[in-house]
Image (cartoon, helix red, strand yellow):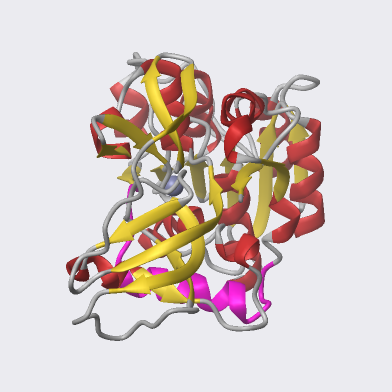
């Protein structure tokens, strides 16, 4: 079967491997759609997270974990699933391949897709669980202001959840006009193109600009800032736009570089900093409920589709924020 393997930095190839054998208690899925995750991009760009993000098949590192498909075979002791079930997966790896084998102890990470939801739409579930977790770590109130740095699939997903659940004022910044257009469609109160204007200055103009004792930098007026970009500049901007006291910074991204920060800013602003990675099972169910219930429109975030044979090009396009939000491999 065709599968997408990681060979080294910026080296993704579509290769031929054996179709895995279904286990006694497992299932075999025919893949229909598989998203390229931000973590897959870290593998691709810098060879970090490689073991965590790939599955060994015939000694090749097969990438992809945001997949959906149809069950084509079950083992003789498999419970809960049958041939023909349409499913979406979280936590399981090896998704960019024609077939994916899931053993019995991992079936709990498969969710049946209801008839009203397409296989492509359902493939956006996994990267919707992460922002659901971020949201619940510190839920914004209706009168609060939230600043989102980075309008990729995570930042936009977080925006969708904040809009679905609260009346909080939302500000989002990015350098991609395409991604900011999506933020407008979702209903962001303010979008800032950081290529055209300084987001910190703009946010302070809107939310407040207050002296912080012993500090050279003033404070903005945001109750929550969330980094969904994973670059040192945006993280520093997140620190700065938070209000003078008791703001919450959520870090929801992975960084390829180390960063120098001034801890005094955290101290004198009594800041809380939360790291958000992963999600609980209950949050997966909640996120899937919002998708299948039509409470959020995930389809607008799917911007590009490529076949398994075109995987190298798909990764290149996913790396261009001006051209893509979520790239899917479809088969
Ligand atoms: Zn993912």
**Residue at 27% over, 73% down:** 108
**Residue at 66% over, 65% down:** 163
Q: Where is residue 248 in the image (x, y as percent from the top left)?
A: 41, 47
Of residues 58 and 283, the one nearer the viewer is 58
Of residues 112 and 147, the one nearer the viewer is 112
Q: In which quarter of the image is the N terminus?
A: top left
**Residue at 19% over, 74% down:** 25
Please say if 195 is above or below 122.
above
Q: Position of residue 220 (x, y in %)?
A: 58, 36
Please say if 194 is above or below 98.
above
**Residue at 75% over, 34% down:** 192
Q: Quadrant of residue 62?
A: top left
The part of the chain drawn in magenta is: 276-296
Q: Where is residue 35 in the image (x, y as percent from the top left)?
A: 54, 47
Q: In which quarter of the image is residue 178?
A: top right
Can residue 231 be seen? no
């Amino acid at each position: 079967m065709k599968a997408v393997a990681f060979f080294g930095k910026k080296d993704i190839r579509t290769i031929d491997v054996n179709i895995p054998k279904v286990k006694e208690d497992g299932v075999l899925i025919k893949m229909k759609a598989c998203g390229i995750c931000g973590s897959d991009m870290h593998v691709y760009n810098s060879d970090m997270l490689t073991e965590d993000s790939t599955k060994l098949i015939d000694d090749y590192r097969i990438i992809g974990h945001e997949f959906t498909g149809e069950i084509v075979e079950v083992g003789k002791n498999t419970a809960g699933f049958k041939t023909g079930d349409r499913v979406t997966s979280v936590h399981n790896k090896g998704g960019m391949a024609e077939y994916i084998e899931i053993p019995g102890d991992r079936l709990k990470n498969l969710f049946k897709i209801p008839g009203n939801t397409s296989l492509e739409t359902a493939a956006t579930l996994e990267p919707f669980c992460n922002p659901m977790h971020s949201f619940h770590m510190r839920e914004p109130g209706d009168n609060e202001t939230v600043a989102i740095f980075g309008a990729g699939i995570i930042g936009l997903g977080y925006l969708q959840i904040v809009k679905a659940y609260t009346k909080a004022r939302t500000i989002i910044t990015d350098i991609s006009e395409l991604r900011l257009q999506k933020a407008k469609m979702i209903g962001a109160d303010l979008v800032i193109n950081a290529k055209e204007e300084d987001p910190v200055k703009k946010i302070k103009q809107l939310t407040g600009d207050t002296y912080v004792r012993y500090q050279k930098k003033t404070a903005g007026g945001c109750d929550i800032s969330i980094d969904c970009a994973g670059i040192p500049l945006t993280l520093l901007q997140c620190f700065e736009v938070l209000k003078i006291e008791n703001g919450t910074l959520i870090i929801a991204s992975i960084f390829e570089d180390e960063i120098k920060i001034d801890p005094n800013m955290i101290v004198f602003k009594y800041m809380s900093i939360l790291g958000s990675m992963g999600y609980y099972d209950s949050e997966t169910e909640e996120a899937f409920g919002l998708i299948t219930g039509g409470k959020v429109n995930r389809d607008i975030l799917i911007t590009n589709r490529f076949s398994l044979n075109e995987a190298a090009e798909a990764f290149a396009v996913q790396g261009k924020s001006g051209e893509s939000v979520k790239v899917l491999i479809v088969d």
